[in-house]
Amino acid sequence: MSADEAPALTLDCTGMRCPRPIIEIARHIGEVEVGALVQLLADDPAAEPDVAAWCRMRGHELVSSEPPHFLVRRAL
Amino acid sequence: MRARGYLSRVAEGLSSVFLDCSSGEPTLPEARAAWQTATTSGWGDPRRLHRPGRLASQALDAVRERVATHVGARPDEVVLTGPLAPTAQAAVAGLALGRRRAGSTVVTSSVEHSAVLAAAAAAGDAVPVPVDRLGRLDLDAWTEAVGRPGVALACLQVANHEVGTLQPYAAAAAACREAGVPLVLDATTALGRVDTTDLGAWSVLLGWAGAFGGPASVGFMVVRRGTRWRAPYPADDHQQGRWPGVVDVPAAWSAAAALDAVVADSDVVAERQRRLVDRLRDGVGGRVPDVDLAGDPVDRVPHLLTFSALYVDGEALTLELDRAGFAVASGSACSAESEHPSHVLAAMGALTHGNVRIGLARTTTEAEVDAFLDVLPGVVSEIRARLGAT
């Protein structure tokens, strides 16, 4: 990610238990262009493995994972 | 007929198909009968010279002999212990004590049983070695880790207790031997499931009877002769100071009977369970959308299958399956006593929410597996709909 590439959408799922943050990002990622970034804020302990697993299963790119901050690039 | 029986049990609201043998098999009839026999004649104090004492002492000798046979050891190397947690603590702390001069690092895989990880963390500086997507140890990283200076001991499981993947235990043990590092081999999930008579160059082997249908109070620690293990507690005159306190002879006798029973027909049971898990794996993958199947599909113990369904919470899944008549385990957070998801799933990069862990019983039938596969897709889609995830 280049320094000036801002997320097209930020989802604040702080305080939500999994799978809710994953449901939210799945529901909203279609709102950004293919190739654009979605930032997810999630502090549930399961978010770190589950955001990565969801990206793998869905083909999206996990750009960065620094809990509670996650950055995902939308694939198709 | 079985299907009808199943349906009527469901109508009564009973969770009657037990698929939660990943951490323990229900007590075997052989184990129960052995316990009853031993409480009649083996109740004496094995340290006494009178007849009841001698009978108990002979029973314990026979137990050690039978355990030794099943793990490829000598009877005098077998120490009868308790549940896995204190047994693992004794094994790890005792080696750490005996190897104090070598260092304080304890190398483990990242997917060991939590009791082993806790024992490692308490005994020294724990170094977890990563696993791949199937949950299998990174052997190169392991070899490098045990070869570094300052390593007191290493701990590895024969097979993973949640996802079933077999570890490269023989090669890992050879790397330890090469480095002069003693290995604690946790055979809990493997005993009675795969051949455990030649598990390689381990120094201390762990087992627990609850896993194979014996009493949950009995475990064992097999300490190879020549191993630098020191009792990490005050030594007494039971079991040559290697495990403190009186031995529950009937329970130990029952544990040996359970191990004999599972080993005796392990080929037949393993073959059936292997086929049923294949059937479950295909069925879950084919009938439930967005599911993450965990573990090695081939190189595994026969009775375990773990999978996770996206957009479902493990607690709801477990409860709804119970309502539908199926008892399963889950590695998802909130579905157990922990707020954290399974460290095994996280280490493998598997999805941790919506997790179901199935451990087939020895008696699980194809009809029960098919009934589970019929119920699961509807349960998952209903929870997804409830969470607004469809």
Image (spheres, helix red, strand yellow):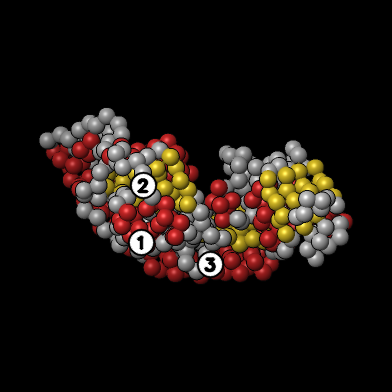
Tag 3 subunit: B
Residue at 44% over, 60% down: B139
Horizontal relation, residue A41 to residue B17: left or right: right
Q: Nearer the viewer, mark 1 or mark 2?
A: 2
Q: Nearer the viewer, residue A38 or B83?
A: A38
User: What type is the residue that disc 3 sits on?
Assistant: Pro
Q: Nearer the viewer, mark 2 or mark 3?
A: 2
- Residue B149 — which label? 2
Residue at 39% over, 42% down: B105
Tag 2 subunit: B
Q: Residues within 10 Å of mark 1 (few under 14, many from 20)?
A: some
| Residue under pointer 3 | B297
Asked which secondary structure carries label 3, the reply is loop
Which x, y percent locates residue B167? 44, 60
Can residue B30 be seen here? The reply is: no
Q: Are marks 3 and 1 in contact (CB under 8 Å)?
A: no
Quadrant occupied by the N terminus of chain B: bottom right
Q: Earlier in the sequence, mark 3 or mark 1?
A: 1
| Residue under pointer 1 | B170
Q: Are marks 2 and 3 in contact (CB under 8 Å)?
A: no
Q: Earlier in the sequence, mark 2 or mark 3?
A: 2
Horizontal relation, residue B320 to residue B138: left or right: right
Can residue B294 be seen here? The reply is: yes
User: What type is the residue that disc 2 sits on?
Assistant: Pro
Q: Are marks 1 and 2 in contact (CB under 8 Å)?
A: no
Asked which secondary structure carries label 2, the reply is loop
Which x, y percent locates residue B39? 28, 41
User: What type is the residue that disc 1 sits on?
Assistant: Ala
